[in-house]
Image: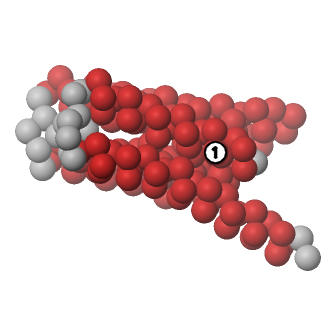
Amino acid sequence: MNLLNRYFTPFAAILILLAVVFSEVDRRTIYLAVGVWGVSLAVNWWFAANTYHFVGWANRLKALQVWLNFVWAVPLFYLLHGFWGPMWLLFVMAPVTAALYQGRMATLGTSLVSAGTMLGLYWMHGLEGPAWGMAVSHAAFIVLFSLFIHALADTALRLASR
């Protein structure tokens, strides 16, 4: 979980900050996005600090954090993707977290849910024409990148156990 907090939480902060600074986001949207991000920071910090205090629950807490990262991505993407195109990258966080802490099928499932939700939100916002090619390539990246990270993590575990 520390890997998530060390690398992906600052990345999410950068995405949100850039969306707010370099686009014309209204105040209400800024407050909502920063509020969701703040809650996600607090929850991720708590998980990182306390997951291993509950040894019997550690695997369940890791799985919960994977899905909470998905939950945070949905409103942040919904609020900011019209202002800042790279917001789709938030949907990479949950599958990559799953890739580090869960099996291949859980990683695949998480990445398909994340990619499908992103495509659904694009559809809700009326994405049309060639933009669907971009959206599908984003979805494919989410799935393939998370499987790649899972393979790397699996290889590292196998090499470390030799």
Q: In the image, 98: left or right of 88?
A: right
Across and down, in percent, residue 75 comes to 36, 27
Q: Quadrant of residue 120?
A: top left
Q: Nearer the viewer, residue 15 or 143?
A: 143
Across and down, in percent, residue 137 comes to 38, 52
Q: In the image, 143: left or right of 18?
A: right
Label tally: 1
Q: Nearer the viewer, residue 127 or 76?
A: 127
Q: Residue drawn at (84%, 69%), measured in percent from left and top?
A: 158
Give the vertical position of 135 relative to 127 (above or below).
Answer: below
Q: Secondary structure at mark 1?
A: helix
Residue pushed farthest right? 162
What residue would you read off at disc 1?
108
Q: Quadrant of residue 73?
A: top left
- Which color scheme did the rendering employ for the protein? secondary structure
Across and down, in percent, residue 84 comes to 21, 45
Q: Residue drawn at (30%, 49%), measured in percent from left and top?
A: 133
**Circle 1 Cα neighbour tier, 10 Å, few/some/many (<14 / 14–19 / ≥20):** many
Residue pushed farthest front? 129
Across and down, in percent, residue 140 comes to 46, 51
Any part of residue 1 in sight: no
Q: In the image, 2: left or right of 129?
A: right
Q: Nearer the viewer, residue 112 or 7?
A: 112
Q: Residue drawn at (80%, 66%), measured in percent from left and top?
A: 157
What amino acid type should be assigned to the residue bearing mark 1? Leu
Give the vertical position of 125 relative to 53 (above or below).
Answer: above
Any part of residue 29 in sight: yes
Q: Residue drawn at (67%, 54%), measured in percent from left and top?
A: 100
The C terminus sits in image quarter? bottom right
